[in-house]
Amino acid sequence: MIGSESLALIRESASDIGPELGAPSRFGELSQILPAAHLDLLKQYNGFTLFQGAFRLFGFRSDSSLDLLNWNAEQTWRFAWGSRLTEYLFIGETGWGDQYAYRLDGSGQLHGSEIYFLEANSMEAESLSQSFEAFLAGEMLRNAVEPYDAMTVDALNANGALDPAEHWVLTPSLVLGGDDRIENLSTLPATTAMIFAGDVAKAMESSRPGALPKAVSPWTDEAGRTRLRVDFA
């Protein structure tokens, strides 16, 4: 059960709150496997952002940027990462593209109530919270008050609030040798940023040992999506 203090903080600090959820059953099997506390919160606050768009919780919504069903659809962005993400159900994210997720078992049910943090450039997962209630209080609402990441604060101070449909990106990517300096910061549509990160991650993994990235170039796939190709020296 979500505590009264947490609910009060959401009321005071959340933005981009979705419309009333209504009957969760019409949103299919994903709504049926969420823990009770998670689903109860979505009934009151159907997805929202915190700290000027820097932290997002997905809901069941018509706007695709904060819709849990759209974000988890293979064709939205997950395809770019191959098969490594099949066991995760993404429930929220940071403005950098770091993902919050439950793990799924082989039958598509939750593998417990634990929530994981997946880093944006690698999608490497680490355990974050043992329950949705702990995740809400210890990660989402903690960051709503005082984010632990200095670059997040710097990005907001430099550029203002981040649109829920966008991600911050560093150019060049840290994976390609870039620096995490605020002057290298720009924004991209969230789905594009996730596709680009997947393309880069897969290219780096498949490159010859010791090969250095030389350049990246855009290309368009058969579905009309802009992708990135990495060339190596």
Image (cartoon, rainbow, N blue to C red):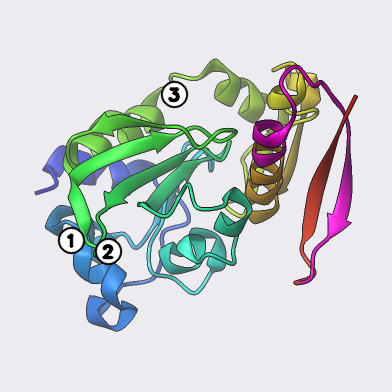
- Residue 186 % position (x, y): 77, 35
Q: Which residue is mark 3?
A: 147
The quarter holding residue 27 reads bottom left
184 horizontally vs 204: left or right: right
Q: CA distance from mark 2 to mark 3?
A: 33 Å
26 horizontally vs 68: left or right: left
Circle 2: is it few (<14), some (14-19), or many (20+) Cα within 10 Å? some
At mark 3, the secondary structure is: loop
Any magenta on residue 127? no
Q: Is residue 21 visible?
A: yes
- Residue 168 % position (x, y): 66, 37
Circle 1: is it few (<14), some (14-19), or many (20+) Cα within 10 Å? some
Which span is picked out in magenta? Answer: 202-222
Viewer-nearest of discs 2 and 1: 2
**Relative to residue 46, is residue 3 depicted above or below?**
above
Ranked by sequence position, the earlier of labels 2 and 3 is 2
The quarter holding residue 225 reads bottom right
Q: Looking at the picture, which amino acid does disc 3 mark?
A: Pro
147 horizontally vs 220: left or right: left
| Residue farthest along the left direction in this orientation | 1
Q: Nearer the viewer, residue 45 or 209?
A: 209
Q: Which residue is mark 1?
A: 40
143 horizontally vs 193: left or right: left
* Residue found 34% across the figure and 63% down from its top: 46
